[in-house]
């Protein structure tokens, strides 16, 4: 039995077709990434899968239970952590946990035991009696995730779990996700962080304009565009002129600034490396590092969605 089964899902908002016959399945115990640009249909999909919105057509089930016809029993098996916080600032972390437990119909003894365990895991036990309004963004995000796990769900929906967080919170959340998957919990993850999806997900689905553009493991998706190869090079003396010079090298199709390095896209990395070394010698500018790279999940995302890179700035839409 699949953890999630979606068949020909359709959702209309007046004349706008937000989901256009979307179909996919999520295996029990896998981390499934759901990627797409803003307005692609990610939020609409989650709202349907969690029983908040009714689809216009098609069907969706959670562990075999139809989310429309059997909403309550389907929801009992899931935890939901939205990007926007659902915690109450004027009460304590412990009170928030207990309130979440009541919402999920967790018995008093179980929610107290589970609440203590989760606050300890997320490094918040010492702050259990503190009002949440004094918490940092990272602490609030950790509390939100703890609340989503209070009912010990078989399926966890995570909407942008590490967006804008500090390093400590990121590491804690990633460690917890790994522990959950080792226990067989299924995770449905939406994220704009391409590298996060690449590291965390068993499979990813890329949705664009309400349609699924591709579904596969990150590595297999990368292999579909092997022609997108690159050389990443750092020079001892950096300057804006280097970007112009690199664009004029033979075989370079695109140039991007990535921190203190320059990434050059090419179909022949070996030949390009020779050109870079000749350039460095002629300009008396030593190469500090040079690395050949295959296509990234970001490259796949951009190719499939048609989003343009903000060239030279290293930004991603």
Image (cartoon, grey):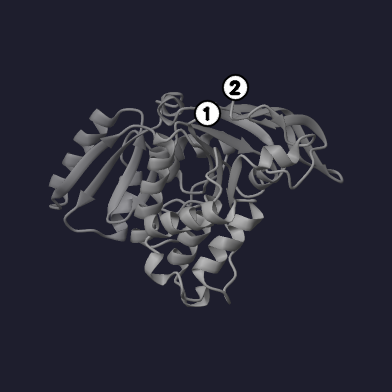
Q: Quadrant of residue 271?
A: top left
Relative side of 87 to 178, left or right: right
The residue nearer to you, when weighing 310 against 12, is 12
Q: Which residue bears the numbered disc 2?
A: 1
Say the numbered circle drawn on residue 105.
none
Q: Residues within 10 Å of mark 1 (few under 14, many from 20)?
A: some
Looking at the picture, how far across and down is residue 143, in whole percent?
Answer: 49, 61
Q: CA distance from mark 2 to mark 1?
A: 8 Å
C-beta proximity under 8 Å, tags 2 and 1:
yes
Left or right relative to 289: residue 259: right
Residue 301 in percent (x, y) is at: 51, 38
Q: Residue at x 74, y 33 (%)?
A: 20
- Seen in the picture, residue 31 relative to 14 is either above or below; the reply is above
Is residue 40 in view?
A: no
Q: Is residue 213 visible?
A: yes
| Mark found first going from the N terminus, 2 or 1 | 2
Report helix, strand or loop for mark 1.
loop
Point out the residue furthest to the right here: 14
Residue 299 placed where, x, y %? Answer: 45, 37
Residue at figure coordinates x 37%, y 45% from the top left: 255
Crowd rating for badge 2 (residues with CA inside 10 Å; few <14, some 14–19, many 20+)? few
Residue 45 located left or right of residue 290:
right
Left or right: 148 with respect to 222? right
Closest to the observer, 144 or 257: 144
Task: Find numbered disc 2 in the image and state the secondary structure of the residue it sits on.
Answer: loop
Q: Residue at x 60, y 26 (%)?
A: 25
Q: Find residue 145 and report its horizontal and vertical position in percent.
A: 50, 55
Closer-to-camera residue (290/157): 157
Farthest front residue?
A: 109
Quadrant location, the N terminus: top right
What label does residue 28 carry, if any? 1
């Amino acid at each position: 039995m699949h953890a999630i089964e979606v068949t020909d899902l359709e959702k209309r908002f007046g004349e706008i077709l937000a989901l256009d016959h979307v179909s996919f399945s999520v295996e029990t115990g896998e981390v499934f990434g759901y990627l797409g640009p803003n307005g692609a249909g990610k939020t609409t999909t989650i709202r349907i899968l969690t029983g908040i919105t009714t689809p216009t057509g098609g069907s969706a089930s959670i562990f075999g239970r139809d989310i429309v016809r059997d909403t309550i029993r389907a929801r009992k098996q899931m935890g939901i952590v939205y990007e926007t916080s659902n915690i109450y600032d004027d009460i304590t972390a412990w009170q928030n946990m207990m309130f979440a437990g009541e919402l999920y119909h967790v018995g008093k003894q179980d929610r107290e035991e589970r609440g203590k365990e989760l606050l300890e895991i997320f490094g918040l036990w010492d702050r259990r009696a503190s009002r949440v309004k004094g918490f940092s963004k990272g602490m609030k995000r950790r509390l939100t995730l703890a609340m989503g796990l209070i009912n010990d769900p078989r399926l966890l929906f995570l909407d942008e779990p590490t967006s804008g967080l500090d390093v400590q919170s990121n590491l804690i959340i990633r460690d917890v996700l790994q522990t959950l998957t080792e226990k067989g919990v299924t995770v449905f993850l939406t994220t704009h962080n391409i590298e996060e999806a690449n590291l965390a997900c068993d499979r990813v689905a890329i949705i664009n304009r309400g349609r699924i553009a591709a579904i596969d493991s990150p590595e297999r998706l990368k292999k579909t565009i092997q022609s997108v190869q690159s050389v990443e090079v750092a020079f001892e003396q950096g300057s804006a002129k280097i970007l112009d010079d690199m664009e004029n090298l033979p075989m370079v199709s695109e140039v991007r600034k990535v921190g203190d390095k320059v990434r050059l896209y090419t179909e022949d990395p070996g030949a390009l490396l020779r050109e870079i070394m000749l350039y460095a010698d002629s300009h008396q500018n030593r190469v500090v590092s040079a690395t050949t790279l295959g296509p990234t999940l970001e490259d796949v995302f951009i190719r499939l969605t048609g989003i343009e890179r903000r060239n030279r700035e290293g930004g991603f839409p």
